[in-house]
Image: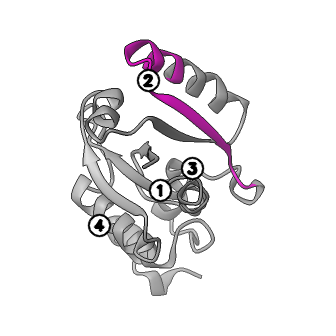
Amino acid sequence: MRIAVYPGSFDPVTMGHLDIINRSALLVDKLVVGVLNNNSKTPLFSVGERVNMLKEVTKKIPNVEITSFSGLLVDFVDSLDAKIVIRGLRAITDFEYELQMSQTNRMLNGSIDTIFLNTNLKYSYLSSSMVKEVAQYGGDIGEFVPEQVIAKVYEKYGISKESIS
């Protein structure tokens, strides 16, 4: 069985993330979306909330499993008997960082390979940070995140979805 892991913060999950999830799920038998519990960051959503949002938006993709992890990615991947890490690339700056991470992971565990997927051009500008910035000022994030996530993001900022024009 070919198992891959798509790790990230997903704070919140965006349409770009969902695009990578859908495309990755076609490449492997099982795709585990690993939600990173990073104690050095202060996320908008708790790990549990992020896991639940991802479960909701991926429920129709049969070979996708959502779980959280902390610690080293290579240890998490190894614990799942996976051999593949999936990463999305939006720009050359992403590539430089992701290549460095991939090479470090390869040094830590030589049996794990990274597959880079270019993001859909439609989402090449999109990041969770950008979504949060637009939302906190009451901007429309309807094109940026799945429908099930929109109200949850606004709620975190105390904004009712109905007040967005």
Residue in the foreground of this view, choosing between 87 and 48? 87
Above or below residue 143? Residue 110 is above
Q: Which label belongs to residue 111?
A: 2
Closer to the camera: disc 3 or disc 4? 4
| Magenta extent | 102-120
Q: Name the residue under label 4.
A: 52
Question: Which comes before the other along the chain, label 1 or label 3?
Answer: 1
Horizontal side of residue 98 vs 9, given as left or right: right
Real-space Cα separation, disc 3 to disc 2, in angstroms? 30 Å
Question: Which comes before the other along the chain, label 3 or label 2?
Answer: 2
12 falls in the magenta region? no
Closer to the camera: disc 2 or disc 4? 2
Q: Which label belongs to residue 29?
A: 1
**Hey, what amino acid is under mark 2?**
Ser
Residue 159 placement (x, y as % from top left): 39, 74
Q: Mark 3 points at which residue?
A: 127
Real-space Cα separation, disc 3 to disc 4, in angstroms? 19 Å
